[in-house]
Amino acid sequence: MPEISSFYGIVIYMYMSEHNPPHFHVKYQDYEAIITIKDGIITGSLPRRALRLVYEWLDQHQDELLANWERLGKSEAPVKITPLQ
């Protein structure tokens, strides 16, 4: 599972050949979640503070995430995305 970004102990991954809708995976400590790129729907759980940071990062990088989703759908490697600063 390619890691595409990490910040404040939060690691963002995307899998190749995943199912729709476009989404990414988040790991933080013992928590794991899946978040849709277009509407931010979360499956799983994250602490409130971590989720707030992930949503802020998602807002800043939505277009890049969608581009990575398309790359992975073509079996191409994803591009790293700048972490939240």
Image: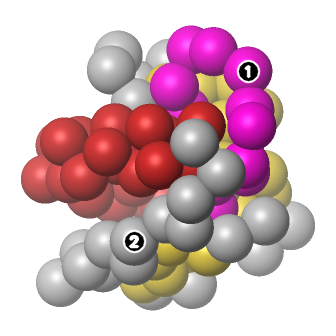
Residue 46 visible in this rendered orientation of the protein? no
Relative horizontal placement of residue 84, taking residue 54 as reference (left or right):
left
Q: Is residue 17 magenta?
A: yes
The quadrant in which residue 45 appears is top right
Q: What amino acid type should be assigned to the residue bearing mark 1?
A: His
Residue in the picture at 25% in, 79% down? 82
User: In the picture provided, is 81 more to the left or to the right than 74?
Assistant: left
Q: Which residue is mark 1?
A: 19
Towards the viewer: 51 or 13: 13
Q: Is residue 43 above or below residue 78?
A: above
Question: Which numbered circle lies on residue 79?
Answer: 2
In this picture, residue 37 sits left or right of residue 24: left
Q: In this view of the protein, which residue sits in the foreground, 29 or 1?
A: 1
Whole-percent x and y of residue 20?
Answer: 63, 15
Above or below: residue 61 compared with residue 63: below
Instruction: Answer whether residue 65 is visible to the viewer in this image.
Output: yes
Badge 2 or badge 1: first in the primary sequence:
1
Q: What kind of secondary structure does the magenta stretch mostly adopt?
A: loop
Residue 53 percent coordinates (x, y): 34, 59
* Magenta range: 13-23
Q: Residue at x 44, y 38 (%)?
A: 70
Label total for image: 2
The image position of residue 78, as x and y in percent, is 49, 65
Instruction: Pick the quarter of the image with the C terminus.
Output: bottom left
Q: Is residue 57 left or right of residue 25?
A: left
64 in magenta = no
The amino acid pointed to by label 2 is Val
* SS category of the residue bearing label 1: loop
Indicate the position of residue 24 as horizontal and vertical percent values.
Answer: 57, 44
Packing grade of label 1 (10 A; few <14, some 14-19, many >=20) is few
